[in-house]
Image (tube, rainbow, N blue to C red):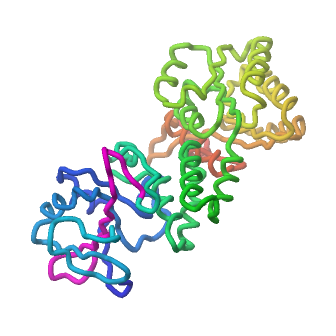
Amino acid sequence: MQHHPWEALTVKEINNLMKNIPITWWIAGGWALDLHYGQQTREHDDMDILIRNEDLPALKKHLGESYELFIADNGVLTMLTEPESPSGASGSLWVRKKQGTAWLFEIMLIDSENDEWIYKRDNQIKRSISRIGALTDDGIPYIKPEIQLLYKGGSSVIREKDYWDLERLLPVLKKSEIKWLYYSLRQQFNGKHPWLEIIHNKMEDLPAHTLVIGGTGMLSAASLWLADHSDKVSIIARNQTKMDRVLNKTDAASSITPLFVDYKDSTGLKERIKAAILQNGPIDLVIAWIHSDAHHALDIICHEVAQEIPAWKLYHILGSSSSLNQIKDAAVKKYPGCQYRQIQLGFILEKEDSRWLTHQEISNGVIDAVVHDREVKVIGTVEPWGKRP
């Protein structure tokens, strides 16, 4: 089948083709992972979609006489002549224009029962149909990354690009998604699979306890992301209403510990940090946005954190300053166990105008810095500084 030409539909084209059909469907394959990642990371030779077996007649009717469907089974393509699902083990259909020669997309048929998706390779692995997909900001449906990675890792042949997809996606998966993928592969392969060690190491690398300063305002979106990627997140806040807004936006509220204190209050700050460590364990990741008028807050936080753990990371968020290197050197010298990272907030140039960063842009930049462990991350631009708003 590899000799048949492909002129795969784009994401936009497959969405336009499918959006008016009254069935549930999802983009799958490498494109699904890139949609979750937020950008295209590699070339894709084809376009895959997933539908339920029972929805095939509706899809075939929707496509009408303009398209031909072929059952793909063991390297052989056979035209589908009846609207019902193909018999046998095949769950794959290739689609092209009638009398055309190029393949446009592949339909992957999934088993379901009582509104549950059933994994074909191990029917003990199931999930509610409503929880196997996600939507892009533009409303395009795609299969969730941990399920797509299970399809890739659960295949009899794992390709080099599948390893690449795993390594790329693991840093952005939620801790619950990573654990689900790990235990599903372990279930399918009785604990013996080349990806298990890779995934287990990633689980071990997840922060056990993250401390966020500035996490209910400018960094609220970053706080929500961190709650999904850390076992525990302590957030320093002064305002109960802002904290409640954060808690109400996440399913991981149980992972969040509010620390109500004004970080200008040195005594109160020290007490709350100690209490957070006592409750949630040593802090191994700190995200700090501290105003310049709270001179001692970062010193107090670093002192308390460093006493409880030999190595930890600090992502220090700063406005542009001519003394950034001096600040970095001081932090490293004072706290040798601290892996210091710096995030510089700039501005956005738009033709002849400029504007300050939005809160979402700042949070996205912080998340990028953490995911990729960037030693220095500039959000926006800091040059030329004379063009700032």
Q: Position of residue 350 (x, y in %)?
A: 45, 46
| 161 within the magenta span | no
Q: Position of residue 54 (x, y in %)?
A: 23, 56
Q: Quadrant of the N terminus?
A: bottom left
Q: Residue at x 24, y 76 (%)?
A: 70
Q: Residue at x 77, y 38 (%)?
A: 323
Q: Position of residue 101 (x, y in %)?
A: 23, 84
Q: Position of residue 124 (x, y in %)?
A: 46, 52
Instruction: Give the quarter of the image for residue 312.
Output: top right
Q: Is residue 329 above or below residue 239?
A: below
Q: Is residue 240 above or below residue 283?
A: above
Task: In the displayed orientation, state which residue is furthest to the left.
Answer: 65
The overriding secondary structure of the stretch rendered in magenta is strand
Q: Is residue 380 above or below residue 62?
A: above
Q: Residue at x 56, y 24 (%)?
A: 216
Q: Which residues are magenta?
A: 92-119
Nearest the eye: 83 or 248: 83
Q: Residue at x 33, y 47 (%)?
A: 138
Instruction: Give the quarter of the image for residue 261.
Output: top right
